[in-house]
Amino acid sequence: MRIKADTEVCIGAGMCVFTAGDVFDQDEDEGTVVVLLPEPPPDRHAAVRRAVQVCPSGALSISENA
Amino acid sequence: MTNAMHEPVTFPVTREHPLDPPQDFTRWREDAPLRPMLFADGHVGWLATGYAASRAVLADPRFSNDVQVTHPPIPQRIRQQTLAKFPGFFLREDPPEHTRFRRLLTGQFTVRRMRLLEPRIEKITSDRLDAMEREGSPVDLVQSFALPIPSLVICELLGVPYSDHDRFQRDSSALLNLDNSIERAREAMESLLDYVRGLVARKREEPGDDLISGLIATGKLTDVEITGASVLMLVAGHETTANMLALGTYTLLRNPAQLAALRADPSLAEPAVEELLRYLTIVHLGPVRTATEDVEIEGRTIRAGQSVTVSLSAANRDPGRFGDPDSLDITRQATGHLAFGHGIHQCLGQQLARIEMRIGYPALLGRFPGLRLATPGEEVAMRSNMAIYGVHRLPVAW
Ligand code: SF4
Protein backbone atom coordinates (compact mmCIF):
# COMPACT_ATOMS: atom_id res chain seq x y z
CA MET A 1 0.00 0.00 0.00
CA ARG A 2 1.25 3.44 -0.91
CA ILE A 3 -0.27 6.70 0.36
CA LYS A 4 -0.54 9.81 -1.76
CA ALA A 5 -1.40 13.13 -0.16
CA ASP A 6 -2.23 16.31 -2.00
CA THR A 7 -1.36 19.23 0.26
CA GLU A 8 -2.95 21.66 -2.17
CA VAL A 9 -6.31 20.03 -1.54
CA CYS A 10 -5.81 19.33 2.19
CA ILE A 11 -7.66 21.68 4.55
CA GLY A 12 -5.81 20.67 7.69
CA ALA A 13 -8.78 19.23 9.51
CA GLY A 14 -6.49 16.68 11.10
CA MET A 15 -8.87 13.76 10.70
CA CYS A 16 -6.03 11.64 9.34
CA VAL A 17 -3.84 12.35 12.38
CA PHE A 18 -6.83 11.73 14.60
CA THR A 19 -7.47 8.37 12.92
CA ALA A 20 -3.91 7.13 12.36
CA GLY A 21 -1.52 9.34 14.29
CA ASP A 22 1.45 7.06 13.69
CA VAL A 23 1.06 7.31 9.92
CA PHE A 24 0.09 10.97 9.50
CA ASP A 25 1.16 14.26 11.03
CA GLN A 26 0.41 17.88 10.28
CA ASP A 27 2.73 20.64 9.17
CA GLU A 28 3.48 23.07 12.01
CA ASP A 29 2.73 26.19 9.98
CA GLU A 30 -0.06 25.37 7.63
CA GLY A 31 -1.58 22.36 9.33
CA THR A 32 -1.53 20.43 6.10
CA VAL A 33 -0.96 16.71 6.08
CA VAL A 34 2.51 15.17 6.38
CA VAL A 35 2.73 11.47 5.60
CA LEU A 36 5.08 9.84 8.10
CA LEU A 37 4.80 6.35 6.66
CA PRO A 38 4.12 6.52 2.91
CA GLU A 39 4.21 2.71 2.79
CA PRO A 40 2.52 1.74 6.04
CA PRO A 41 2.93 -1.78 7.44
CA PRO A 42 0.01 -4.16 6.90
CA ASP A 43 -1.28 -3.84 10.46
CA ARG A 44 -1.95 -0.15 9.78
CA HIS A 45 -3.81 -0.65 6.51
CA ALA A 46 -7.26 -0.69 8.05
CA ALA A 47 -6.61 2.54 9.96
CA VAL A 48 -5.20 4.18 6.83
CA ARG A 49 -8.27 3.20 4.82
CA ARG A 50 -10.45 4.71 7.51
CA ALA A 51 -8.37 7.90 7.43
CA VAL A 52 -8.79 8.15 3.66
CA GLN A 53 -12.51 7.63 4.09
CA VAL A 54 -12.98 10.29 6.78
CA CYS A 55 -10.70 12.91 5.20
CA PRO A 56 -13.11 15.76 4.47
CA SER A 57 -11.24 17.20 1.52
CA GLY A 58 -10.33 14.15 -0.53
CA ALA A 59 -6.64 14.98 -0.18
CA LEU A 60 -5.63 11.37 0.50
CA SER A 61 -5.54 8.42 -1.81
CA ILE A 62 -3.94 5.00 -1.73
CA SER A 63 -2.67 2.65 -4.36
CA GLU A 64 -2.76 -0.93 -3.20
CA ASN A 65 0.00 -2.64 -5.12
CA ALA A 66 2.70 -0.07 -5.65
CA MET B 1 -40.29 14.34 -11.21
CA THR B 2 -43.49 16.08 -10.33
CA ASN B 3 -45.36 13.16 -8.82
CA ALA B 4 -46.96 13.75 -5.44
CA MET B 5 -44.17 11.93 -3.66
CA HIS B 6 -41.69 14.52 -4.76
CA GLU B 7 -43.67 17.67 -4.26
CA PRO B 8 -41.28 20.17 -2.66
CA VAL B 9 -41.27 19.87 1.13
CA THR B 10 -40.38 22.56 3.62
CA PHE B 11 -37.58 22.06 6.14
CA PRO B 12 -39.08 20.65 9.35
CA VAL B 13 -37.97 22.26 12.60
CA THR B 14 -40.38 20.73 15.10
CA ARG B 15 -39.16 17.61 16.87
CA GLU B 16 -41.49 14.96 18.23
CA HIS B 17 -38.75 13.79 20.62
CA PRO B 18 -36.15 16.20 21.96
CA LEU B 19 -33.16 14.02 21.12
CA ASP B 20 -34.33 12.80 17.72
CA PRO B 21 -34.48 14.78 14.48
CA PRO B 22 -38.00 15.49 13.14
CA GLN B 23 -39.66 12.26 12.00
CA ASP B 24 -40.37 13.52 8.49
CA PHE B 25 -36.67 13.11 7.76
CA THR B 26 -36.86 9.36 8.24
CA ARG B 27 -39.69 8.93 5.75
CA TRP B 28 -38.07 11.21 3.21
CA ARG B 29 -34.67 9.62 3.52
CA GLU B 30 -36.13 6.18 2.77
CA ASP B 31 -38.06 7.49 -0.17
CA ALA B 32 -35.46 9.84 -1.69
CA PRO B 33 -32.29 10.88 0.17
CA LEU B 34 -32.18 13.95 -2.06
CA ARG B 35 -35.52 15.56 -2.78
CA PRO B 36 -37.01 18.89 -3.84
CA MET B 37 -37.43 21.44 -1.11
CA LEU B 38 -39.19 24.79 -0.95
CA PHE B 39 -36.93 27.45 0.54
CA ALA B 40 -38.18 30.33 2.70
CA ASP B 41 -37.97 32.83 -0.16
CA GLY B 42 -39.95 30.67 -2.60
CA HIS B 43 -36.91 29.14 -4.28
CA VAL B 44 -37.29 25.46 -5.17
CA GLY B 45 -34.04 23.66 -4.39
CA TRP B 46 -33.12 20.43 -2.66
CA LEU B 47 -32.93 18.73 0.71
CA ALA B 48 -30.30 16.06 1.38
CA THR B 49 -31.17 13.64 4.19
CA GLY B 50 -29.05 10.61 3.23
CA TYR B 51 -25.47 10.18 4.39
CA ALA B 52 -23.98 9.54 0.94
CA ALA B 53 -25.89 12.36 -0.73
CA SER B 54 -24.95 14.80 2.05
CA ARG B 55 -21.28 13.91 1.85
CA ALA B 56 -21.35 14.18 -1.92
CA VAL B 57 -22.80 17.71 -1.79
CA LEU B 58 -20.46 18.93 0.94
CA ALA B 59 -17.33 17.56 -0.73
CA ASP B 60 -18.09 18.77 -4.25
CA PRO B 61 -16.18 21.91 -5.34
CA ARG B 62 -18.98 22.72 -7.78
CA PHE B 63 -21.05 23.87 -4.81
CA SER B 64 -20.59 27.36 -3.40
CA ASN B 65 -20.95 28.40 0.23
CA ASP B 66 -21.04 32.10 -0.59
CA VAL B 67 -23.87 33.74 1.36
CA GLN B 68 -24.77 35.83 -1.62
CA VAL B 69 -25.79 32.91 -3.77
CA THR B 70 -27.50 30.70 -1.17
CA HIS B 71 -31.21 30.71 -0.43
CA PRO B 72 -32.53 30.69 3.16
CA PRO B 73 -33.90 27.23 4.08
CA ILE B 74 -36.07 28.58 6.91
CA PRO B 75 -37.47 32.10 7.41
CA GLN B 76 -35.14 32.83 10.34
CA ARG B 77 -32.15 32.24 8.12
CA ILE B 78 -32.93 35.32 6.05
CA ARG B 79 -31.66 37.26 9.03
CA GLN B 80 -28.45 35.31 9.24
CA GLN B 81 -27.75 35.70 5.56
CA THR B 82 -27.84 39.46 5.84
CA LEU B 83 -25.40 39.33 8.74
CA ALA B 84 -22.92 36.82 7.42
CA LYS B 85 -21.19 39.13 4.99
CA PHE B 86 -18.23 40.82 6.57
CA PRO B 87 -14.50 40.63 5.87
CA GLY B 88 -12.82 37.65 7.47
CA PHE B 89 -15.99 35.56 7.67
CA PHE B 90 -14.25 32.86 5.69
CA LEU B 91 -16.81 30.23 6.54
CA ARG B 92 -19.13 31.75 3.98
CA GLU B 93 -16.56 32.27 1.25
CA ASP B 94 -15.35 30.04 -1.54
CA PRO B 95 -11.78 29.30 -2.63
CA PRO B 96 -9.42 31.02 -3.18
CA GLU B 97 -10.49 33.50 -0.45
CA HIS B 98 -11.53 30.69 1.87
CA THR B 99 -8.26 28.85 1.31
CA ARG B 100 -6.22 31.94 2.17
CA PHE B 101 -7.81 32.22 5.62
CA ARG B 102 -8.06 28.55 6.32
CA ARG B 103 -4.35 28.06 5.58
CA LEU B 104 -3.34 30.79 7.99
CA LEU B 105 -5.45 29.28 10.73
CA THR B 106 -5.05 25.53 10.40
CA GLY B 107 -1.47 25.63 11.70
CA GLN B 108 -2.92 26.91 14.97
CA PHE B 109 -5.41 24.07 15.27
CA THR B 110 -3.34 20.98 14.48
CA VAL B 111 -3.96 17.83 16.49
CA ARG B 112 -0.50 18.19 18.04
CA ARG B 113 -1.07 21.78 19.16
CA MET B 114 -4.40 20.86 20.61
CA ARG B 115 -2.77 18.08 22.61
CA LEU B 116 -0.35 20.62 24.05
CA LEU B 117 -3.39 22.41 25.44
CA GLU B 118 -4.58 19.30 27.26
CA PRO B 119 -3.01 20.04 30.69
CA ARG B 120 -4.46 23.54 30.59
CA ILE B 121 -7.92 22.22 29.69
CA GLU B 122 -7.68 19.65 32.49
CA LYS B 123 -6.87 22.43 34.95
CA ILE B 124 -9.72 24.64 33.73
CA THR B 125 -12.10 21.68 34.01
CA SER B 126 -11.10 20.72 37.53
CA ASP B 127 -11.29 24.37 38.64
CA ARG B 128 -14.88 24.47 37.40
CA LEU B 129 -15.70 21.26 39.24
CA ASP B 130 -14.22 22.74 42.44
CA ALA B 131 -16.41 25.81 41.96
CA MET B 132 -19.48 23.60 41.46
CA GLU B 133 -18.70 21.78 44.67
CA ARG B 134 -18.40 25.05 46.56
CA GLU B 135 -21.68 26.30 45.08
CA GLY B 136 -23.38 23.14 46.27
CA SER B 137 -26.12 21.00 44.76
CA PRO B 138 -28.23 21.80 42.76
CA VAL B 139 -26.61 23.95 40.06
CA ASP B 140 -27.35 24.86 36.47
CA LEU B 141 -24.76 22.80 34.61
CA VAL B 142 -24.84 25.19 31.63
CA GLN B 143 -23.75 28.23 33.64
CA SER B 144 -21.45 26.40 36.04
CA PHE B 145 -19.70 23.97 33.75
CA ALA B 146 -20.67 23.62 30.11
CA LEU B 147 -20.34 27.26 29.08
CA PRO B 148 -17.34 28.44 31.14
CA ILE B 149 -15.01 25.65 29.99
CA PRO B 150 -15.06 26.25 26.21
CA SER B 151 -15.34 29.95 26.89
CA LEU B 152 -12.18 30.03 29.00
CA VAL B 153 -10.35 27.83 26.51
CA ILE B 154 -11.22 29.85 23.39
CA CYS B 155 -10.46 33.10 25.23
CA GLU B 156 -7.02 31.84 26.21
CA LEU B 157 -6.33 30.55 22.72
CA LEU B 158 -7.37 33.77 21.00
CA GLY B 159 -5.96 36.03 23.70
CA VAL B 160 -9.31 37.54 24.69
CA PRO B 161 -9.54 38.63 28.36
CA TYR B 162 -12.00 36.29 30.06
CA SER B 163 -13.07 39.14 32.33
CA ASP B 164 -15.02 40.48 29.33
CA HIS B 165 -16.93 37.23 28.86
CA ASP B 166 -20.28 38.58 30.06
CA ARG B 167 -20.32 40.95 27.17
CA PHE B 168 -19.46 38.64 24.31
CA GLN B 169 -21.43 35.71 25.69
CA ARG B 170 -24.52 37.89 25.67
CA ASP B 171 -23.80 39.10 22.14
CA SER B 172 -22.95 35.65 20.91
CA SER B 173 -26.19 34.15 22.17
CA ALA B 174 -28.23 37.11 20.85
CA LEU B 175 -26.70 36.44 17.47
CA LEU B 176 -27.60 32.77 17.46
CA ASN B 177 -31.12 33.18 18.80
CA LEU B 178 -33.27 32.81 15.73
CA ASP B 179 -36.21 34.53 17.42
CA ASN B 180 -34.35 37.82 17.64
CA SER B 181 -35.11 40.58 15.16
CA ILE B 182 -32.61 41.49 12.48
CA GLU B 183 -31.99 44.75 14.36
CA ARG B 184 -31.14 42.98 17.60
CA ALA B 185 -28.88 40.50 15.83
CA ARG B 186 -27.15 43.25 13.88
CA GLU B 187 -26.57 45.17 17.10
CA ALA B 188 -25.00 42.10 18.68
CA MET B 189 -22.78 41.62 15.67
CA GLU B 190 -21.68 45.27 15.67
CA SER B 191 -20.95 45.04 19.36
CA LEU B 192 -18.80 41.93 18.86
CA LEU B 193 -16.94 43.49 15.95
CA ASP B 194 -16.35 46.67 17.97
CA TYR B 195 -15.01 44.75 20.90
CA VAL B 196 -12.62 42.60 18.87
CA ARG B 197 -11.52 45.55 16.73
CA GLY B 198 -10.28 47.27 19.89
CA LEU B 199 -8.52 44.13 20.96
CA VAL B 200 -6.74 43.70 17.63
CA ALA B 201 -5.57 47.33 17.76
CA ARG B 202 -4.17 46.76 21.26
CA LYS B 203 -2.40 43.56 20.22
CA ARG B 204 -0.82 45.30 17.28
CA GLU B 205 0.81 47.64 19.81
CA GLU B 206 1.60 44.96 22.37
CA PRO B 207 1.61 41.47 20.88
CA GLY B 208 1.11 38.48 23.16
CA ASP B 209 1.55 34.78 22.85
CA ASP B 210 -1.93 34.16 21.42
CA LEU B 211 -3.66 33.36 18.16
CA ILE B 212 -4.76 36.92 17.34
CA SER B 213 -1.22 38.21 17.86
CA GLY B 214 0.01 35.30 15.74
CA LEU B 215 -2.32 36.27 12.90
CA ILE B 216 -1.14 39.87 13.10
CA ALA B 217 2.46 38.67 12.95
CA THR B 218 1.91 36.79 9.67
CA GLY B 219 1.48 40.15 7.97
CA LYS B 220 -0.90 38.47 5.55
CA LEU B 221 -4.24 39.79 6.79
CA THR B 222 -5.61 43.25 7.39
CA ASP B 223 -6.88 44.21 10.85
CA VAL B 224 -10.41 44.21 9.49
CA GLU B 225 -9.99 40.63 8.27
CA ILE B 226 -8.38 39.51 11.52
CA THR B 227 -11.26 41.08 13.42
CA GLY B 228 -13.85 39.24 11.34
CA ALA B 229 -12.11 35.89 11.56
CA SER B 230 -11.63 36.29 15.32
CA VAL B 231 -15.31 37.09 15.88
CA LEU B 232 -16.15 33.97 13.91
CA MET B 233 -13.85 31.81 16.06
CA LEU B 234 -15.00 33.41 19.28
CA VAL B 235 -18.66 32.75 18.54
CA ALA B 236 -18.01 29.29 17.12
CA GLY B 237 -15.84 28.36 20.09
CA HIS B 238 -18.53 29.27 22.57
CA GLU B 239 -21.90 27.87 21.81
CA THR B 240 -20.96 24.66 20.07
CA THR B 241 -18.87 22.83 22.67
CA ALA B 242 -20.94 24.32 25.48
CA ASN B 243 -24.05 22.75 24.02
CA MET B 244 -22.34 19.44 23.42
CA LEU B 245 -21.19 19.32 27.05
CA ALA B 246 -24.63 20.17 28.44
CA LEU B 247 -26.80 18.25 25.98
CA GLY B 248 -24.39 15.31 26.09
CA THR B 249 -24.65 15.15 29.87
CA TYR B 250 -28.43 15.38 29.66
CA THR B 251 -28.43 12.54 27.14
CA LEU B 252 -26.20 10.34 29.29
CA LEU B 253 -28.34 11.01 32.36
CA ARG B 254 -31.36 9.87 30.37
CA ASN B 255 -29.53 6.74 29.17
CA PRO B 256 -28.37 5.22 32.46
CA ALA B 257 -26.87 2.08 30.92
CA GLN B 258 -24.63 4.14 28.63
CA LEU B 259 -23.74 6.43 31.50
CA ALA B 260 -22.77 3.47 33.67
CA ALA B 261 -20.65 2.02 30.88
CA LEU B 262 -18.72 5.26 30.46
CA ARG B 263 -18.29 5.67 34.19
CA ALA B 264 -16.98 2.14 34.53
CA ASP B 265 -14.51 2.48 31.69
CA PRO B 266 -13.05 5.95 31.05
CA SER B 267 -11.26 4.60 27.97
CA LEU B 268 -14.69 4.73 26.34
CA ALA B 269 -14.49 8.53 26.43
CA GLU B 270 -13.14 8.73 22.89
CA PRO B 271 -15.81 6.61 21.16
CA ALA B 272 -18.46 8.10 23.47
CA VAL B 273 -17.60 11.61 22.29
CA GLU B 274 -17.88 10.54 18.64
CA GLU B 275 -21.17 8.82 19.29
CA LEU B 276 -22.64 11.78 21.16
CA LEU B 277 -21.54 14.05 18.32
CA ARG B 278 -23.28 11.79 15.82
CA TYR B 279 -26.39 11.16 17.86
CA LEU B 280 -26.98 14.78 18.87
CA THR B 281 -25.70 16.67 15.78
CA ILE B 282 -26.22 20.08 17.35
CA VAL B 283 -25.82 21.93 14.03
CA HIS B 284 -29.40 20.85 13.45
CA LEU B 285 -30.63 23.31 10.86
CA GLY B 286 -28.18 22.29 8.23
CA PRO B 287 -25.64 23.98 6.03
CA VAL B 288 -26.69 25.19 2.59
CA ARG B 289 -24.70 25.01 -0.64
CA THR B 290 -25.51 26.32 -4.09
CA ALA B 291 -24.56 24.62 -7.33
CA THR B 292 -22.35 26.73 -9.60
CA GLU B 293 -23.04 24.40 -12.53
CA ASP B 294 -25.38 21.48 -13.14
CA VAL B 295 -24.39 18.63 -10.83
CA GLU B 296 -25.61 15.05 -10.92
CA ILE B 297 -25.98 13.40 -7.49
CA GLU B 298 -27.72 10.09 -6.83
CA GLY B 299 -29.43 10.26 -10.17
CA ARG B 300 -30.91 13.73 -9.63
CA THR B 301 -29.73 16.81 -11.45
CA ILE B 302 -29.15 19.87 -9.34
CA ARG B 303 -29.25 22.82 -11.68
CA ALA B 304 -26.77 25.69 -11.55
CA GLY B 305 -28.10 28.28 -9.10
CA GLN B 306 -30.14 25.79 -7.06
CA SER B 307 -29.49 25.57 -3.32
CA VAL B 308 -29.26 22.33 -1.36
CA THR B 309 -29.90 22.15 2.38
CA VAL B 310 -27.99 19.33 4.00
CA SER B 311 -29.58 17.92 7.12
CA LEU B 312 -26.58 16.76 9.10
CA SER B 313 -28.90 15.32 11.76
CA ALA B 314 -30.73 13.18 9.24
CA ALA B 315 -27.50 12.07 7.54
CA ASN B 316 -26.06 11.00 10.88
CA ARG B 317 -29.13 8.83 11.50
CA ASP B 318 -28.94 7.13 8.10
CA PRO B 319 -29.34 3.37 8.69
CA GLY B 320 -27.35 2.78 5.51
CA ARG B 321 -24.28 4.16 7.28
CA PHE B 322 -24.84 3.58 11.01
CA GLY B 323 -26.59 0.40 12.16
CA ASP B 324 -29.56 0.98 14.49
CA PRO B 325 -28.95 4.73 14.12
CA ASP B 326 -31.56 5.92 16.60
CA SER B 327 -30.01 4.23 19.57
CA LEU B 328 -27.16 5.72 21.51
CA ASP B 329 -24.28 3.25 21.67
CA ILE B 330 -21.03 4.69 23.01
CA THR B 331 -19.09 1.61 21.98
CA ARG B 332 -19.85 1.92 18.28
CA GLN B 333 -17.40 3.22 15.68
CA ALA B 334 -19.11 6.53 14.91
CA THR B 335 -16.10 8.27 13.34
CA GLY B 336 -17.04 9.50 9.90
CA HIS B 337 -20.20 11.19 11.16
CA LEU B 338 -20.98 14.60 9.71
CA ALA B 339 -21.48 16.51 12.97
CA PHE B 340 -18.55 18.79 12.10
CA GLY B 341 -19.62 18.99 8.48
CA HIS B 342 -17.57 17.64 5.61
CA GLY B 343 -15.52 19.08 2.78
CA ILE B 344 -13.39 22.20 2.84
CA HIS B 345 -15.51 23.96 5.45
CA GLN B 346 -15.36 21.14 7.97
CA CYS B 347 -15.03 22.59 11.46
CA LEU B 348 -11.63 24.09 12.12
CA GLY B 349 -11.94 23.70 15.88
CA GLN B 350 -13.08 20.08 15.89
CA GLN B 351 -9.97 18.62 17.52
CA LEU B 352 -10.16 21.21 20.27
CA ALA B 353 -13.85 20.43 20.82
CA ARG B 354 -13.06 16.70 21.03
CA ILE B 355 -10.41 17.25 23.69
CA GLU B 356 -12.69 19.47 25.78
CA MET B 357 -15.37 16.79 25.73
CA ARG B 358 -13.03 13.87 26.22
CA ILE B 359 -11.74 15.56 29.35
CA GLY B 360 -15.04 17.11 30.41
CA TYR B 361 -17.50 14.18 30.55
CA PRO B 362 -15.34 11.72 32.50
CA ALA B 363 -14.16 14.45 34.89
CA LEU B 364 -17.73 15.50 35.64
CA LEU B 365 -18.96 11.94 36.12
CA GLY B 366 -15.91 11.06 38.19
CA ARG B 367 -16.27 14.01 40.53
CA PHE B 368 -20.00 13.56 41.11
CA PRO B 369 -20.83 9.85 41.21
CA GLY B 370 -24.40 10.68 42.21
CA LEU B 371 -25.00 13.21 39.42
CA ARG B 372 -28.67 13.36 38.43
CA LEU B 373 -31.20 15.71 36.87
CA ALA B 374 -32.71 18.07 39.43
CA THR B 375 -35.93 18.46 37.40
CA PRO B 376 -37.89 15.87 35.44
CA GLY B 377 -36.14 15.27 32.11
CA GLU B 378 -39.23 16.27 30.11
CA GLU B 379 -39.22 19.71 31.70
CA VAL B 380 -35.78 20.67 30.47
CA ALA B 381 -36.21 23.43 27.87
CA MET B 382 -34.60 22.56 24.55
CA ARG B 383 -32.94 25.12 22.28
CA SER B 384 -35.20 24.52 19.30
CA ASN B 385 -35.11 28.23 18.46
CA MET B 386 -31.33 28.43 18.30
CA ALA B 387 -28.96 27.86 15.40
CA ILE B 388 -27.12 25.42 17.68
CA TYR B 389 -29.30 22.83 19.42
CA GLY B 390 -28.97 22.07 23.12
CA VAL B 391 -30.56 22.86 26.46
CA HIS B 392 -31.14 26.35 27.82
CA ARG B 393 -30.52 25.31 31.41
CA LEU B 394 -29.67 21.99 32.97
CA PRO B 395 -30.42 21.79 36.70
CA VAL B 396 -28.39 18.94 38.18
CA ALA B 397 -27.94 17.65 41.71
CA TRP B 398 -25.56 15.14 43.32
S1 SF4 C 1 -7.81 14.57 7.03
FE1 SF4 C 1 -7.53 15.27 4.93
S2 SF4 C 1 -7.86 17.45 5.02
FE2 SF4 C 1 -7.54 16.77 7.11
S3 SF4 C 1 -5.34 17.07 7.50
FE3 SF4 C 1 -5.63 14.97 6.81
S4 SF4 C 1 -5.34 15.06 4.59
FE4 SF4 C 1 -5.66 17.14 5.27
Image: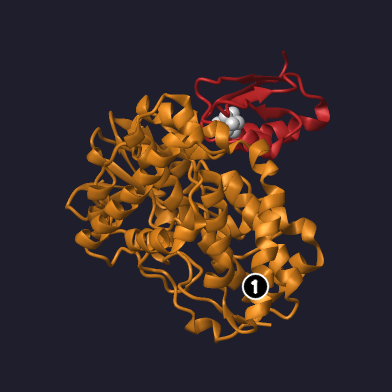
Chain colours: A red, B orange
Instruction: Using residue A18 as the reference point, say whether residue B395 is left or right of it.
Output: left
Residue that appears at 41% across and 26% down:
B100
Q: Nearer the viewer, residue A17 or B138?
A: B138
Whether residue B183 is visible to the viewer of this picture, yes or no, is yes
Q: In the rendered view, tell whether residue B87 sits above or below residue B126.
A: above
The residue beneath circle 1 is: B131
Quarter the C terminus of chain B occupies: bottom right
Q: In the rendered view, tell whether residue B64 sits above or below residue B220.
A: below
Q: Quadrant of residue A50?
A: top right
Whether residue B102 is visible to the viewer of this picture, yes or no, is no
Residue that appears at 28% across and 67% down:
B179
Going by the numbered disc 1, the residue's amino acid type is Ala
- Rate crowding at label 1 as few (under 14), some (14 to 19) or many (20 or more) other CA atoms within 10 Å: few
Q: Is mark 1 within 8 Å of ligand 1?
A: no
Residue B304 image point, x, y percent: 25, 32
Taking the image as four quarters, which one is ligand 1 found in?
top right
Instruction: Using residue A60 as the reference point, say whether residue B78 is left or right of it.
Output: left
* Outermost front residue: B205
Residue B277 image point, x, y percent: 57, 56
Chain at tag 1: B
Instruction: Tell me the SS state at disc 1.
Output: helix
Q: Nearer the viewer, residue B53 or B378?
A: B378
Q: Nearer the viewer, residue B346 or B371?
A: B371
Residue that appears at 52% across and 47% down:
B338
Residue A44 image point, x, y percent: 78, 31
Residue B184 image point, x, y percent: 24, 62
Residue that appears at 41% across and 70% down:
B15
Q: In the rendered view, tell whether residue B181 sits above or below residue B355.
A: below
* Outermost top residue: A66
